[in-house]
Amino acid sequence: MSQNTQLEVNGVKVPVSNLDKVMYPDTGFTKGDVIHYYIRIAEQMLPHLNARALTLKRYPDGVKGFFFYEKQCPPHRPRWVKTTQVEKTGGQIDYCMINDVPSLVWAANLANLEFHTFLHRKTAVTRPTVLAFDLDPGPPADILTCCQVGLLLKDCFDSLGLQSFPKTSGSKGLQVYVPLNTPVTYARTKAFASAVARALESECPDLVVHKMLKKLREGKVLVDWSQNDDHKTTVSVYSLRAKDRPTVSTPVTWAEVVSAWKRGKKLSFEADEVLKRVKKHGDLFAPVLELKQKLPALKALG
């Protein structure tokens, strides 16, 4: 089905096209499959996108082809796709917001595979709702090494009385979120995240690095704290990733992280597996939206 058509989604007619275009050549996963996945995961995903400006990452010819990031929401968008203005030097950007299923389908039809959101909502652009860490392995380190470092992060937060939640990046790493949902600034979260990364590197110098320089990262895990910034976006939970296979940034339990590390079982989930997981477990990342925790003072890190 390659011709233009319309898909009725929650009473809204959404234009769709080229549904049989193969987006993931290694698996035959089509644009129609991408749209179908996002419709089925919408109940769990939309609360994490709601009221947040986001950057689109579009792959017009599939994951093997050209791609581009799109911050300015396309001017040809339907009237029901909401936007929010973000100030920048010399002007402003009207970012898309994906608050409902029709908007999600519209974006997927643009060959947008990945959704990258800010850590704040549009109603409080100076107030991040979470503390976020991206654990990125430098070969030969891999996601299992990230699991080991993730557990060290968990121990750190446990000692501070903070709950933390892991998810796969959908690529080669692991991400750890600490929900806050209380008044805090990016200046504080960024400084705190940097201090955590530095402390972890000091404690485990053969395993952890906090600087992005590639020459420092071989066989180690970069604890990327720099995502805690009002100008940066991070891949959303439940977003597809543009890899060889339709992998997804998937929430996991700490028990699964422990099991993966101890048993050498790599954490990676594709779209169909994620749909089965949410049917069984619900949204494991739901507490990230509502759990209220106060960021401790830096001195709490010792």
Image: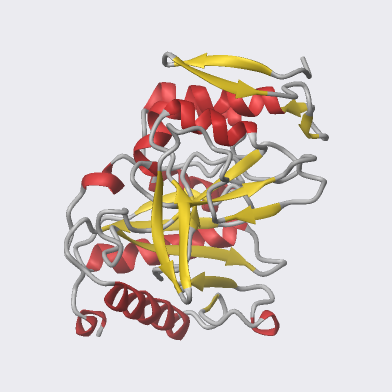
| Whether residue 282 is situated above or below residue 223 in the rendered picture | above
Please name the residue shown 59% across and 40% down the image. 240
| Whether residue 7 is situated above or below residue 262 in the rendered picture | above
Q: Is residue 297 left or right of residue 36?
A: left
Please name the residue shown 50% across and 41% down the image. 250
Q: Can residue 136 be seen in this snapshot?
A: yes
Depth check: give the residue in front, 21 or 271: 21
Q: Position of residue 176 (x, y in %)?
A: 42, 58
Depth check: give the residue in front, 281 or 86: 86
Please name the residue shown 33% across and 45% down the image. 51
Q: Quadrant of residue 35?
A: top right
Quarter the N terminus occupies = top right
Q: Position of residue 268 (x, y in %)?
A: 60, 42
| Whether residue 161 is situated above or below residue 265 in the rendered picture | below
Q: Position of residue 230 (x, y in %)?
A: 39, 68
Q: Is residue 110 left or right of residue 154?
A: right
Depth check: give the residue in front, 152 or 93: 93
Q: Is residue 162 left or right of residue 64?
A: left
Q: Position of residue 108 (x, y in %)?
A: 60, 34
Q: Can residue 277 be seen in this snapshot?
A: no
Please name the residue shown 33% across and 64% down the image. 155
